[in-house]
Amino acid sequence: MSIEGNEESCERSTATSLIRAKRKTSVVWDYFIRLKPNSIDGKYEVQCMICKKIFAMGPTFGTTNLKRHLEKHNPDKAKEGQNEPIDQKTYREKMSLAICRHNYAFSFVEHKGIRDIHSYLNPIARHISRNTAKSDILNLYAREKELLKAELALISSRVCLTSDMWTSLVSNGYMCVTAHYVNINWVLQKRVLIFRHVPPPHSGVVLGHFLIDFLKEWGIEKKIFALTLDNATNCNKGVVDVLKNHLSLMRSLVCEGKFLHVRCGNHILNLIVKAGLAKVDAAIGKIREGVKYIKNSEVRLEKFAECLSNLGLPCSKKLRQDVPIRWNSTYQMIESALLYQQAYIHYDLVDPDFRHGLFEDEWKKVEIVATFLRPFYDITTLFSGCKYPTANLYLPNIWRIEMLLVEHKRSKDPMMTEMATSMLKKFKKYWESYNIILSIAMVLDPRYKLNFVKFCFSKLNSDSADQKVKVIEDNLKLLFEEYLIPSTTTSLSTSLPEEHACSSRNQMTEAFEEFDMFQSQLESSTSKTQLELYLEEANVDRKTNPNLDVLGFWKDNKLRYPELSLMARDVLSVPITTVASESAFSTGGRVIGKFQSSILPANAEAKLCTRDWICGQEDLDGFKSDSDEDEIVVDLQPYVDKLRDHHISKDNPQ
């Protein structure tokens, strides 16, 4: 070929590429798809995504013919039975929400099956790449973060935090910080603020400075009321000391940080119960190994199901193995084993390789232990709530536990005496260091107040009861003084919740607000404070209001007790466990799982936090609270059904 021919070919190729680049900007390409690659002369075919008609195209072809054809469909005003144009921005946002909500990988948007479904539902949908999906999620995260920061800036209540550390599958350390606060409608809120990779070392001082940087990032340095941490004493002391020193310099802590540090109630219960379970470890160990033995083989599960069927036992509960580091899962394993006690005994007879059967006296011990531990399990579950205040529940239930331990310490059963003694020793160790704010929270529950505190301490230790109650009463008054308005001429927006200050006012509304302020000033001029009036008022009937909405009570009485209600709002938002942060680790285990272990920490944080902010506390798709649930639990119903179907087909051959 001549040089001229080569030059002509290059020019043609360049012209073709320029035409192709220009053609991609036309609106028609939202409705047409290319079918075949260019032929030698540069021609190719395109197909209408609405009616599937095929058109020929080439280097010299324009788009006029395609536009004329498109006008017949009138895509902007789609007729009945035709695909309506979609908002590509909305489509991409919904894909981002789906990825966060259900923990899909970014490559989910490139899966052929997913693209086929979307094209079938609407042929004009434009598919996106994994990089586009990642960018969309980061943009969604940034948008939702700014909205949440604005909400936290506007609320007048203080913010309580829970925090914990977690190690991912690839051994990266992540710090989770969750905010708890009462919003403008007096509803308790929980939000995961960060789920961030923290490089080692993970000492208390390092984590404390990291936490300070995080507070600056969110603009809530001056709003912190309490910080709930687990029982890792050495590390947590460093975190609390660093945070307390920093916030003290800013004069932003209530009572100079006296109530800042709260220990996780569930961690303390876990340590107490484990001290008791150690005394019956042999019997519980047999149950644990027996469950492992049965569930690790399909044949054994079928044989166990046959034992259930032969004995006529229900299979409502699942065969459950425990996680030794969490005592409540051990209790669930024991409860399940007791239901299937006869099946275990029968299985021990039919399987000669089974070496984990319990003797009769061991089953009796396990049954006694299960009855003893039931209140502990119920209280642990109660403390784990995030949708309702828990600070006011701490003292009455901890008092109940101590009474239970004292009672069983005097038991005639040597095993129970030994268990209770060991647990009581551990209990007293942690009881001495509990945060007094939790006693104040119970006083602010109108069903209990101060008299119930006096009753609890008098039942436990009559010698020092008065002294302990006096300490609580003094701290209650000290805290209340922090919330008192320094001047009677304080603006209404300070003394009343912000929804009144921000709402549009007509003449009648202003008149009522002036009356409310006048009434508040009259009350403040009397000799008795709001706190004294509240304590002297009759308690709310506990029997007729067992599930009283405590925050609702203070919302309804905010005009009677303007400053006291604000104090109650902050105290009742204190979480007594780190469950809110720990539950994020279950989601983290799926976000950074074995199939997504290489995800960047920033992307993992964006997915996890966005899911929490948008979905809130929904139980999405039946996600379990524990990421390892599928590995430790076996549903026996399918095996029993399979056995029954086999017998039916055997008895009724065709």
Image: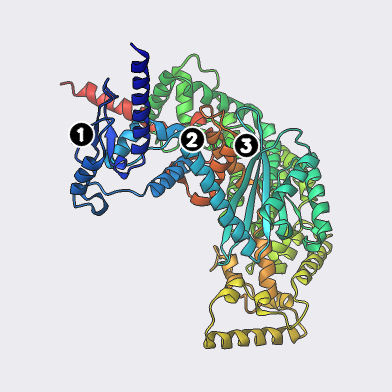
Mark found first going from the N terminus, 3 or 2: 2
* Numbered disc in front, either 3 or 2: 2
Q: Which mark is residue 326?
A: 3
Q: Is residue 413 left or right of residue 203?
A: left
What's the amino acid at mark 1? Phe
Residue under pointer 2: 131
Across and down, in percent, residue 456 comes to 72, 60
Q: Marks 2 and 1: CB-CB under 8 Å?
A: no
Residue flagged by tag 2: what amino acid is it?
Asn
Left or right, 185 with reference to 495: left
Nearer the camera: disc 2 or disc 1: 1
Furthest-top residue in view? 1
Residue 208 screen position, x and y as percent: 77, 45
User: How far apart are labels 2 and 1 at the CA level?
Assistant: 32 Å
**Quick check: 616 left or right of 256?**
left
Provide the residue designation for mark 1.
Answer: 55
Q: Secondary structure at mark 2?
A: helix
Q: Quadrant of the rendered structure where residue 238 is?
A: top right
N-terminal label among 3 and 1: 1
Amino acid, disc 3: Arg
